[in-house]
Every structure is written in structure tokens, then in C-alpha cells.
Image (cartoon, rainbow, N blue to C red):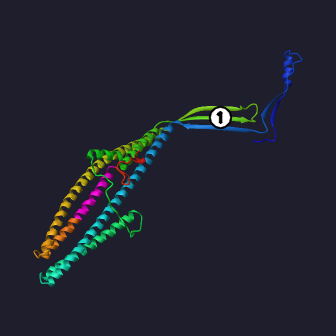
């Protein structure tokens, strides 16, 4: 602040001189004039104040912990969603591969039936068999054509589903390849697999993070029951304020506030936070039991799928041998076309059963990998991602 001039106050000391003379002071004693500076022409004041809420530090710290745990839960939920998408893609892929292999089996069967039709036609013209034998072969050809329509529909639908999961136009062509599985079978016992799931599953990591967040929120809510204690400090520097004003001054203190009228509402908040913490704990326990059951189920499904493929392969070998015998008997006119057709149908069905059982094993392995917390895009022994930290 700038004034037009300084402000000084002068004291008249002549009265002091007369008083001192009456008191017997020597005439040589002189009282000089006195002057006090009230303010300078330029004035300045600087104030620095700091208020540190001590009690709220408790709430701030635990609130920060709660947000950190919720961020972990969000990362875990994102990882779980990614793995669900991976599993959906695996299911669509193996359904598509199954449909393609079935289509190949039907194509081979159609070529065989066409050869039977030509051979039977020759037999009819030669008078070796009746015409109904040719009609039965032609009926089998039409049945295979009908089956082709259904399988081609399956190929188109599974291709569309795969393209949808990959974010591409539904009719985009696909050239799928299916080699050896990169996912191992289940050499471990069920107990070991369940322990692995409890360590790695992102859903469980999310639940545990939410439980930790609920614990931190409960601790923060309890802090509201405490009185508000604030540490206050201030420093003032005065310039140009005259001789009567201190140049520097500082003070420190503590303030205490406790709103007793809010105790009821605050206690209810604490109780609600405690209930949320208990709910989070129950959810984690339920998730642990559910995941253990899921791992057990997926392990049993994998074992069942492997058994079904063994049975299907034995059935296919038997069907092929039966078809070979019927073909030989038909070639020498020892059996009818109907028996040969039935053998052909059985061989096609057995081939389809092997295809389905093989694909089911591949899918069951991946479902077990997901159930134990592995990422299908990583090896089964890959380290756990950051979301489980």
C-alpha cells in the first residue's frame, strides 16, 4: 500500500522540562523533542497460514487405500473379461473346425455314394439287382445332401461368430488351421488345480481387492467418530507499519471440534461400512467355493471327453471294418444295397463322433486352463499379470 507521505507523531517535551526544574534538576538538563513513526509512505504485510487436519489424515489415508484396491479390482475384472472373450473365441473356433471336418467327411461320403450309384445302375441294367436297390442308393445320396445343408449352415454360423468376436464383417472368409494343442492336459491332481485357481483367477483377485477396499472404507468411516483436531500455524511479516507494530510475529495452536449431534448418523455410516465389509468377505468365500467346484467339474469333463474319444475311435474302426465287409459282399452280390447304405451311414456317423470328441477334448483343455486362472494367449506356466499383485 502506498500513501502520499509518511505519518509521524511528535510529542511536546517542554512540559517535561518545567517539571524536571521544579524537581531540582539542573538547568543544563534538556529533554529532547520526541517523535514516533506511525507508518511509512509504503506499507506491506505478508501472512502465511497453514492448517493441517490431524484427524482427517486417518480418513484420507484409508480412503486412498480403498481407491487403490478398487483400481486393482477393476484391473482384475478387465482381465476376467478378456479371458471370457478368449474362451468364447475358442468355443467358436472349435465349433467351426468341427463343422469343417464334418463337411469334409460328408463330401467324401457323397463321392463314395456316387460311385455306389453308378455301380448299382450297372447292376440294374445287367439284371443282377432290382431297381429298388438303385432307388435306395439315390435316397442315401439325397440324405447326405440334406445333411450337407445343415453342416454348411453350421460352417457359416460359426464363421460369422468368429468374425464377430474378432470385430470383422460376418461374411469375411476364414482360413483356419488346427495343429497340436498348445494347452496341456491335466497331469495335476484336482487339489493342485484348485489351489492354482485360488491363486490365479482374476475374478477371485477382484473379489479380494474389493474386500480390502471394504476394509479400508470401514477404517475410514470409523475415523469420522473421532473429534476433529487441526494443527494451525501462522506467520506475519509487517513492513512500513511504524514503530508501534511488530515486524515479525508468529503463532501456532491446535483446534478441537466434536459435533455430538452427528454421532447417530456417523455411527450408522460405520455400521453400514462394517456390513459392506462382511458382505465382501462372504462374497470372496462363496467365490472360492464356486471356483473349486468349477475346477473339479472341468477336470471331470476333460476326463470324460478323453474317454468319449477313445470310445468313438473304437466305434469308427469297427464302422470302417463293417463298411469294408459290406462293400466286398455287395461286389459279389451277397448283400443288398440297403445293408451297404446302413454301413455307410454308420461310418459317417462314427467319423462325426470322433471329430466331435476330439474338438471337445481341445475345448475342455482350454476351459480347464481358464478355470485354473491361465490366459489362453500365454503358456500355462506364464507369470500372473499385474492385476493379481
Q: Nearer the viewer, residue 110 or 228?
A: 110
Asked if the magenta segment contains residue 367, the reply would be: yes
**Is 169 part of what is drawn in magenta?**
no
Task: Give the image location of residue 317, x and y in percent.
Answer: 18, 63
| Residue at the right extreme, as displayed | 27
Q: Residue at x 24, y 74 (%)?
A: 111
Quick one: SS at disc 1?
strand
In the picture, which quadrant includes the N terminus? top right
Answer whether residue 138 is visible to the viewer in this image: no
Q: Which residue is mark 1?
A: 235
Q: Is residue 186 above or below residue 46?
A: below
From the top left corner, tell me how far across and down residue 234 is, in percent: 63, 35
Front-most of 28 and 120?
Answer: 120
Q: Is residue 152 visible?
A: yes
Occupied quadrant, residue 242: top right
Estimate the x, y position of residue 15 in percent, counting from the top left.
85, 24
Residues in magenta, as a range: 352-372
**Which secondary structure is most common in the magenta stretch?**
helix
Q: At 36% from the left edge and 56% from the top edge, which residue is drawn?
A: 84
Indicate the position of residue 298 as horizontal and vertical percent values. 27, 53
293 in relation to 251, above or below? below
**In the displayed structure, would residue 361 be above or below residue 322?**
above
> Looking at the image, is 79 positioned above or below residue 117?
above
Amino acid at each position: 500500500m502506498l500513501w502520499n507521505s509518511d505519518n509521524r507523531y511528535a510529542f511536546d517535551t517542554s512540559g517535561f522540562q518545567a517539571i524536571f526544574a521544579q524537581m531540582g534538576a539542573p538547568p543544563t538538563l534538556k529533554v529532547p523533542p520526541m517523535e514516533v513513526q506511525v507508518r511509512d509512505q509504503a506499507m506491506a504485510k505478508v501472512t502465511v497460514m497453514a492448517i493441517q487436519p490431524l484427524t482427517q489424515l486417518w480418513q484420507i489415508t484409508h480412503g486412498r487405500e480403498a481407491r487403490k484396491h478398487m483400481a486393482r479390482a477393476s484391473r482384475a475384472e478387465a482381465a476376467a473379461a478378456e479371458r471370457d472373450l478368449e474362451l468364447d473365441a475358442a468355443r467358436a473356433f472349435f465349433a467351426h473346425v468341427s463343422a469343417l471336418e464334418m463337411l469334409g467327411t460328408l463330401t467324401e461320403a457323397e463321392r463314395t455314394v456316387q460311385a455306389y450309384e453308378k455301380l448299382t445302375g450297372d447292376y440294374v441294367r445287367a439284371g443282377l439287382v432290382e431297381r429298388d436297390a438303385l432307388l435306395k442308393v439315390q435316397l442315401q445320396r439325397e440324405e447326405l445332401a440334406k445333411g450337407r445343408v445343415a453342416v454348411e449352415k453350421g460352417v457359416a454360423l460359426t464363421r460369422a461368430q468368429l468374425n464377430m468376436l474378432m470385430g470383422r464383417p460376418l461374411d469375411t472368409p476364414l482360413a483356419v488351421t488346427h495343429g497340436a494343442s498348445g494347452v496341456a492336459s491335466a497331469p495335476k491332481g484336482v487339489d493342485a488345480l484348485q489351489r492354482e485357481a485360488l491363486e490365479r483367477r482374476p475374478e477371485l483377485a477382484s473379489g479380494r481387492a474389493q474386500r480390502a477396499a471394504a476394509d479400508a472404507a470401514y477404517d475410514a468411516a470409523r475415523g469420522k467418530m473421532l473429534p476433529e483436531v487441526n494443527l494451525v500455524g501462522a506467520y506475519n511479516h509487517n513492513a512500513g507499519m511504524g514503530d508501534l507494530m511488530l515486524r515479525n510475529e508468529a503463532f501456532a495452536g491446535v483446534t478441537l471440534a466434536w459435533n455430538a449431534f452427528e454421532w447417530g448418523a456417523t455411527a450408522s455410516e460405520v455400521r453400514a461400512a462394517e456390513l459392506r465389509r462382511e458382505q465382501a468377505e462372504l462374497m470372496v468365500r462363496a467365490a472360492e467355493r464356486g471356483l473349486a467346484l468349477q475346477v473339479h467339474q472341468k477336470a471331470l469333463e476333460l476326463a470324460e471327453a478323453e474317454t468319449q474319444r477313445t470310445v468313438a475311435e473304437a466305434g469308427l474302426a469297427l464302422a470302417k471294418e463293417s463298411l469294408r465287409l459290406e462293400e466286398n459282399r455287395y461286389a459279389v452280390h451277397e448283400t443288398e444295397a440297403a445293408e451297404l447304405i446302413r454301413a455307410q451311414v454308420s461310418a459317417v456317423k462314427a467319423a462325426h463322433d470322433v471329430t466331435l470328441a476330439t474338438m471337445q477334448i481341445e475345448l475342455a483343455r482350454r476351459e480347464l486352463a481358464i478355470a485354473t486362472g491361465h490366459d489362453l494367449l500365454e503358456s500355462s506356466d506364464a507369470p500372473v499379470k499385474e492385476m493379481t499383485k
